[in-house]
Image (cartoon, grey):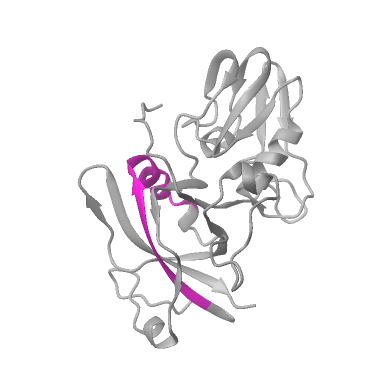
Amino acid sequence: MNAYPTAIGAVGWLYGSVYTDGWATAVPGYRTIQIGASTYTIASGAAQPYWFWEWLTALDTAIGGGWGLALSGDTWTLGGGAPAVVTWLDRTGWLLGFDAEPGDAEPSASSLSPRAPSPAAVPLISCERPEAMSRDAQSKLQISKFGRGHGWTYGAADVYRCRVKLDRLGFDALNTGWLLSGMPVALSPFDVETHALGGATAYDGAYPNGYLTGRILGTDGDGSWVGELVYETTLLLAVEVP
């Protein structure tokens, strides 16, 4: 486990999605937690994938014994019951931000807080309003050092550019690759509690400051460090055309 510096306050977030089920078969990975002698597992059969905030809610629903996941703004706390040892049986602890791998255990406690941002909830310390690119501009994109274009944007999709800045913690979380794997993501000004409570508003013409969902294609050029603490890059987001 690592020691992390204090994060800079976020103004937006990149959220990912989480699969806990396969084709009619529950799959391991991000759905189980052991508290004391009891094991709790997210129920199979739900619509997949979960948005990150839905996954937190599903995990909270699964946990018993007086414990749960309490959300507050952009943070969450695991606890609420009698002191117990929490053992991570799969990668749930890693995705929650505990920097833990399967088999790791937390010292006995009644409340635990993540040690780092979740790889599926990356904080942004600056986020410009996304701008849709023209078809001509899209055709000139090169989103890798090998000159790869944006050709895999399938179906009716627009590409949005968004300039973002991350602190070192956010960069480390993004660099795990969870949000860059092609799974659905949400670029949002709303914290995780607001999303979980249903208070977040989606982007549209009437509400341009809402959250935008799509899939990250990559970055427009290489990112760069501004000093030692701030990383700046331009994300390319493929968004389905309604």
Residue at the limit of the structure toward the bottom, as seen here: 136
**Quadrant where the N terminus is found in the figure:** top left
Provide the residue span drawn in magenta.
158-178
> Can you tell which quarter of the image residue 88 is in?
top right
Viewer-closest of 136 and 42: 136
The image shows residue 137, relative to residue 240, as above or below, that is below
Residue 43 at what x, y percent from top left? 77, 41
Whether 88 is among the magenta residues is: no
**Quadrant where the C terminus is found in the figure:** bottom right
Residue 23 at what x, y percent from top left? 73, 56
Residue 98 at what x, y percent from top left? 50, 30
Residue at the limit of the structure toward the left, as seen here: 227
- Res 153 visible: no
Viewer-closest of 190 and 27: 190
Tell me which residue sits at (77%, 45%) in the image.
44
Q: Is residue 93 left or right of residue 175?
A: right
